[in-house]
Amino acid sequence: MIQILKNGFWNLFGTVFIILSGAILTLVAPKILTVEQFGLWRMFILYSTYAGILHLGVADGYLLNNVSKSISNAFNSLRRSMPFLIVQQILISAIIYFILLLYINDKQLLFIAASVLIFSITINLRTLVDNFLIISKDFRRSNIVKIMEKALFLLVLFAFLTFGKISYQLLIGLFIFASLSALIFLIILVKPKIELSKGIVKDNISDIKIGSQLLSSNILIILLFNIDSVFVNMYLGIKSFAIFSFAITIIMLINQFAESISQVLFPYLATDLRNKLFSANIMVVSGMFGLWVLILQFSFLFLPLINIVFPEYAESEMIIFIYLITSLFTLIIRISQNNLFKVLNAQIVFVRIEVIVLLLLIVLLFIFNSNMSTTVISILILITRFVWFLMNEIYLKSDKRFLLKIVTGFLLYGGIYVSIYFYVENIYLRFILFTIIALPLYIVGFKNFYKKRKLSQ
């Protein structure tokens, strides 16, 4: 447990820096770009989230095949996976761009498509090498690279800002440059020493087969976590998409935190904590619930600032408000449930549940199509995320009493949050009221954590 906390500290440190850099960019980008250019920048960010699926399972298969093996075996596997992935990424990206050239005439869309494909090569190679650090539980170096990437991006961005205006094309270019620099630095740290062998194709095909289930799950996770933005982008126009994306950039900070913590937990759940998987999970979910309440508490202070600092994005306040309520299920699904399904080798079931949730969301979008707005879409996401959470818990046969506590806590604190938001006008009074109500939860949470930590020692 102590080692998990140490690695958790490094991931927390890296995540805090990433969140702060993301927050800075969230504040800067809408100010230095027009609403239309901000929409195009966010379009690149939206579709770059799908870039991670183009490795076709190689990186995921490598992780699953080596997570319980020795570091030397994992390192040898990395040496033969890298050249295969490099060639695969170049071929796939070239084929996709050639197809897009045949059917798309819009230069802006082609530029964004080319940028996403270049970024995909970088991010998938980084994922493969970073998976080696996850397997070896070397979260310190992993986070050093992530911090370096964000620091470099911000430094170069502000350097360019001192000399003149920034376009969305330049912003995308700087983003890719920082990611490529991080990849080079990561390779220098790990020194994978690429190896070409006779069985390279066969070995990597094996990784693809093993990783295909996890890849399918990741594709659906990306789809479910981004279908709202895709729908707004396609049907509600670039201005609505820009406003919606402004809200999502803030919510993505929570998603980044969830992804970071999930990476720390997975290797431990698959090895050290496998025999007490569900008791460890209860502790994790309890922590996520406390974090959710803390997020709601401090949102009372920053939500009103949107109207003051970004008046052109004032409509995003309600979207952020709804997604903050939804974030409890986002945290639990990404940190807890996703890892449990992976450790239990039940990815096929996870994929089936994701398909059901996706179909439910599509049906709801179709039903409410005539009255569609960004607020309606946000509410539909809340409903389907709740259903997704429940279906996962039902399959995992979680403790019913604990599940009832989580659902009751969500309804109670979510209801209090909504009531204070709509019926109390003073910003500071909102914060103080919610803090007083949440205080017993914090006290009980700290006591339970202290007891379990003493028992683990």
Image (cartoon, rainbow, N blue to C red):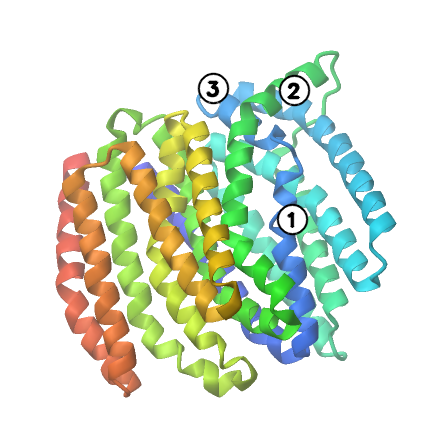
Disc 3: which residue: 69
Say whether disc 2 or disc 3 marks the residue closer to the N-terminus. Answer: 3
Secondary structure under the numbered disc 3 in the rendered image: loop
Determine whether 283 is above or below 62 in the image. below
Say whether disc 1 or disc 2 marks the residue closer to the N-terminus. Answer: 1
Disc 2: which residue: 205
Say whether disc 1 or disc 3 marks the residue closer to the N-terminus. Answer: 3
* Rendered residue at 76%/78% (across/down): 163
Residue type of the residue flagged with mark 2: Ile
Residue type of the residue flagged with mark 1: Ala
Q: Visible in this render: residue 208?
A: yes
- 1 vs 2, front mark: 2
**CB contact under 8 Å: marks 1 and 2:** no
The crowding category of the residue bearing disc 2, from other C-alpha atoms within 10 Å (few below 14, some 14 to 19, many at least 20), is some
Rendered location of residue 412, percent (x, y):
19, 62
* Rendered residue at 68%/55% (across/down): 178
* Rendered residue at 69%/29% (across/down): 82
The crowding category of the residue bearing disc 3, from other C-alpha atoms within 10 Å (few below 14, some 14 to 19, many at least 20), is few
Image-quadrant location for residue 446: bottom left
Disc 1: which residue: 182
Rendered location of residue 81, percent (x, y):
66, 25
* Residue at mark 2 to residue at mark 3: CA–CA distance: 19 Å
The crowding category of the residue bearing disc 1, from other C-alpha atoms within 10 Å (few below 14, some 14 to 19, many at least 20), is many
* Residue at mark 1 to residue at mark 2: CA–CA distance: 27 Å
Q: How many labels does the image show?
A: 3
In depth, the one of 178 and 385 nearer the eye is 385
Q: Quadrant of the C terminus?
A: top left
Residue type of the residue flagged with mark 3: Lys
